[in-house]
Each structure stands twice: as C-alpha cells, then as structure tokens.
Amino acid sequence: MQVTQTKAEGLSHSYDIVVPAKELSQRLDAKIAEVQPQVTLKGFRPGKVPTAHIKRMFGKSMMGEIVESTMTEASEKALTENKIKPAGQPHFHMENEAEDVIAGKADLAFHMHVDIMPTFTPVDPAKLSIERPIAKVADEEIEKSLSNLAESQKTYEDKSAKSKAVDGDAVIIDFVGSVDGVEFEGGAAEDSQVVIGAGQFIPGFEEQLVGVKTGDETVLKVTFPTEYHAPDLAGKQAEFAVTVKAVQKPVATTIDDDFAKKLGMDSLEALREAIVKSLDSEHKAQSRNRAKRRLLDALDAEHDFDLPANMVDAEFNAIWQQIEADVKAGNVDDEDKDKSEDELKTEYRNIAMRRVRLGLVLAEIGQDANIGVAAEELARAVNAEAMRYPGQEKQIAEYFQKNAEAQARLRAPIFEEKVVDYILELAKVKDVEVSRDELYADDEAPGAAPKKKAAAKKKAPAKKAAAKKPAAKKAPAKAAAKKPAAKKAPAKKAAAKKPAAKK
C-alpha cells in the first residue's frame, strides 16, 4: 500500500493511494481460506469445497467487500500517519475502473480529498465580559396576568328578548352554510356560541351579527380567505342561513378568593404568588437567552481562523434549503424581499460561517473542560422527543436508540447549553436591571448574527423521515377549519371558523 500526499493547502488535503492488485489477490485468498471450512455447497462435503470453486462462485462479491474495506483501511492509515483530524468524511475518486479492480486486472488506485479541522486556541472564558439584562416582575404584569385569566374564565348571561347584540356579546345560533346554493360539508351547526369580536370565525361572519335579536333569522354573506386550508372553499363566496336563539352579555369576573379557588388555588394571594413565580421563571429564561446571545457575539469577535469548506457548505445548504422553501410558501422576511439571490446567498453564507465557527469554538472549550452529555441526559431528551408523538412513543424512542446520527442531533444542543453555562460561570457577567419591555425587545448588538428566521432556526430531529408522525387522515371541513384553542370545541361549532395560524 502506497500513500502519497498531493496537496496540503490550508485545511484542504489530498492523497493518492495505491494498493497493488497482487495485495488484493492475497487478501482474497486469505478470505477464502478463512471461510472455506464453513462453506457448504451441493455436491461437496461440508468444508471440502475447493478454493478454486469458491473463488469462481463468490470471488467477485468477496473482492468487492475487500476493495471497500481496503479503501477504508487505507484512508484511515493516511489520516493516522499524517496526524490529521478530518472535518467530515473524506471524498474518494477511483483512478481505475472498479470492475477491473474487482476482476484483479488493475491496482486499487484512488484519490482522497479531506478537509481537516482547524487548529486554534480558544479564548479563556474568564477574560470575557458581558452584560446580562434582568427584570423584576412588576405589579402591572401581575395585574395583567390576572386580567387575562379573568377574561379566559368569562361567562355570559341572556339579555332581554328585544336586546340587540353588540360587540363583545355572545350570540347562540343555528346556521347552515352553502356555496352557489349547495350546502357544504361541515357548514352547519346548532347552538353554536359566537362571541362577536373574538375573531374565531372567518372575516365578516361575526361582524354581521351586530344588531341581531333573539328569534331573528338572517343570511350572512362572507368570502372564505384565499389561503383557507380547505381548497374547495378557499376564496369562495358563501352564504350562512342563521337563526338567532339567544343573545348573551358578558358577566364581569370578580378577581377574589373564590375566583382563585375555581383555578385550583387556595386563595387570591396564592394565585398571585404562582403568577409571580411563573413570570419570574420566564424573565430568568429570557435573561439567560440574552446573555447567551451576547456571549456568542463575544466569542465570534474573539476568534478568526480558517473554516473547513465542507462544513460551511453543509451548513449553508441547510439554511438555503429552508430559504427556498420559505420563498415557495411566500414566507419571505420583509428585509429580504428586495434583495437579489446573490445578495441573500452572501448574507446567509456569512451566517453559516458564524455558526460553524462558534460550533468549533464551543466544542473546543467543552472538550478542554471535559464537558460531556451523560446517558441519562440523552435519555431524557429522547423521552421528551417521543412524547411529542402521542401513541408512537415506543417507535420514536426505538428510532433514536438505533440511529447514532439522530442521537447526535439530540446530544448537540444539550452539549451546547452545558458549555454556554460553563462559560457564563467563568466570564465576567454584569447584571443590568431593565424593564420587562427592554428585556424582551429585539436587540441587534454590534457583531450579532442577523436574526433572520431561517438562519435562527435549526432543524428538529423529528423532521427526519424515519421519525415523522404518520400523516393524519383528512378531517372533514368542519374539523379542519377550527382555530387552535386550549379546550376542544364541539365539532358542530367549527364550520365557519378561521384556519389555524401558522407557527
């Protein structure tokens, strides 16, 4: 076996590797001798099949396996002897025809290209200085949360028979929908409660109920949105024959101990304490997120080294694939709409480079600190992922258990967060008190990565084909038209409701 380095420019290395046909033949003979005692063929006693006959029958397939294993062995030898830490899998190019090599007519000669990991010294975390914004839970936040809870628990009572419905009232109706005089599936409901102004139904439906009285019969004319999820209704004009069975007014909710007890709390004070605890937890999580972002900005500013081209290309291709999908779906950031494709590619390649650079820096710091992901941490992540698919927990868990690449995708964010926490413990972190609005405001600190939605997201492991949920059966129009809600609404109420908003 002969290994010759042909290129060593920066992080790009290439080698020419030659394994003589004679050596391959010797390996084949050794393999045949190894398996001969176990070979059983009709017409021969077990273990007595001649080597020439085995070679004639199985030599081609056995040589194919030998060529494959030899290439792996040769590439590993080249990397080991040259003390190379590869950045991804090497790329191979055969110099001779594979059939000739397998037939023993030509040497196994191939070219190997590999990008290597950069060598750099990461910054000492103790030398980093960042500010961490923090916010106390303000009284107005508590009151707003209480008001929101009271609003969600709102009840209604009947108004007088002659009272007209106004914005905010609830109207109990029966309705039948039709398009071009033909009733459509899911377009009818009885005793459906419509809260005027709640925005639960398609545009124009609720507004036309203003002024109706108990016992009224009317026809509402609406147009389904062009992006409506049911293709047979999207953009269509429809009529709903409506019978008003009751008009109800909202009953103000008194925020007191009884209200708190309805929510499962001992008292109003206990409810307040629970709200404070929840808000404080949210604020701390946001503070940590902002600190992490500033930490990543600081790390990016402290490091400048060559990056493996294949890693940058892979990261960019993943980002660009998402960008193309967003463009196709019409989900383009306002800041991107007027830019050319070349301008966008330049911006997103810079984002890909930042991601790769920071990934390498965090990995190096984590390795130096002996940070790892424990088996129980990975197990919790697998369990959390499986719980996202009710009824398929076992299949999802088995997928991750058997798929090392899938496990790596779950392990990576856990490792990253542990390294970030480690750095934050050592760095000089100054807490700066800010308002709640400032804490949650979008900030673009100098050097920060653009917060473009496609660049900020990372693919969820479950999106891999093997981990996907089976497609749900198509629901009838009335079910498909529902707007997400905390509580499942009766199917009969769903006919005219808006489709779920995109996440």
Image (cartoon, grey):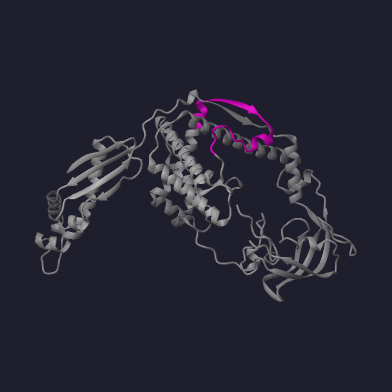
Q: Quadrant of residue 99?
A: bottom left
Q: Residue at x 72, y 43 (%)?
A: 145
Left or right, 36 with respect to 93, comes to left
Q: Position of residue 468 (x, y in %)?
A: 48, 57
Q: Nearer the viewer, residue 320 or 35?
A: 320
Total count of labels: 0
Left or right, 170 with respect to 82, comes to right
Can residue 273 be found in the magenta stretch? no
The quadrant of the picture occupied by the N terminus is top left
Q: Nearer the viewer, residue 105 or 48?
A: 105
Q: Position of residue 29 (x, y in %)?
A: 12, 54
Left or right, 227 with respect to 357, comes to right
The answer to whether one can see residue 48 in this image is no
Q: Position of residue 129 (x, y in %)?
A: 54, 25
Q: Nearer the viewer, residue 335 or 434?
A: 335
The answer to whether one can see residue 351 in this image is yes
Q: Position of residue 143 (x, y in %)?
A: 76, 40
Left or right, 235 with respect to 54, comes to right
Image: 259 above or below 180: above
Q: Residue at x 11, y 69 (%)?
A: 43
Q: Which residues are magenta?
A: 421-449
Outermost residue, bottom direction? 181
Image: 3 above or below 479: above
Can residue 441 be found in the magenta stretch? yes
Image: 485 above or below 427: below
